[in-house]
Image (cartoon, grey):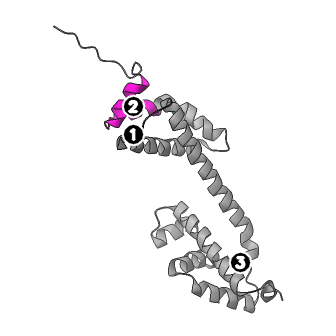
Amino acid sequence: MALRVFKSSSQLDEKEIFERITKGDEKALEIIYKKYYRMMTKLVITNSGTEEEARDVYQDALVVFWQKARSGKLVLTSKMSTFIYSICQNLWRKELDRKKRLSNEEKDTPTTMDMDSPEREKIMAKCLDQLGETCRKVLMYYYFDEMSMQEIAEKLGFANTDTAKTKKYKCKQKLDELVKAQYSEQDFLD
């Protein structure tokens, strides 16, 4: 009579855990989640992130890892923790870049959307009319109706506020390009 010995989750080595993940074992993913949680979230927190952002980045990184492992195309050439850490790093770097873009955009806002003369209003209205309907709505809701990104996302059916922020950023860039292409600085001077 053969005696079967089951290993506890703490006894599994990385290779076994990885093999279980490739087969779709969500319990193995939970083991990884708990095992590397502190290390991965520390990366974000020590680089200007909050606990919540750290948790979100780590969860997103595990989703990426899970998808790659399940695809069968991932061959680990380093430790699993190293691979997941690099995913976290890349995701956090992208998030920091996005935040920087948005904060720079907000610094630009008061001067670029200054509408205190009828001539400027005509120029802006003409350029707004040249944008697509969605862009026009996003900019009008934000700048003229002073809606929050949450309200805009809900009103236009965007997935979330990040989608609305990204759309507003891109639409404002398009508007700026239209204005610069069609008008000189003199058109804006009184």
Q: Quadrant of residue 146?
A: bottom right
Which type of secondary structure does the marked residue at label 2 adopt?
helix
Magenta range is 12-33
**Amino acid carrying mark 2 in the image:** Phe
Other residues around mark 3 within 10 Å, as few (<14) / some (14–19) / many (≥20):
some
Q: Position of residue 181 (x, y in %)?
A: 69, 83
Task: Identify the residue position indicated by label 2 in the image.
Answer: 18
Between tags 2 and 3, which lies in front?
A: 2
Seen from the viewer's position, the closer of residues 116 and 91 is 91
Q: CA distance from mark 2 to mark 3?
A: 53 Å
Nearer the N terminus, badge 3 or badge 1?
A: 1
Task: Identify the residue position indicated by label 1 in the image.
Answer: 69
Which type of secondary structure does the marked residue at label 1 adopt?
helix
Q: Specify whether 110 is left or right of 91.
A: right
Asked if labels 1 and 2 touch by Cβ distance under 8 angstroms, the answer is yes
Nearer the N terminus, badge 2 or badge 1?
A: 2
Q: Which mark is residue 113?
A: 3
Q: Quadrant of residue 118?
A: bottom right
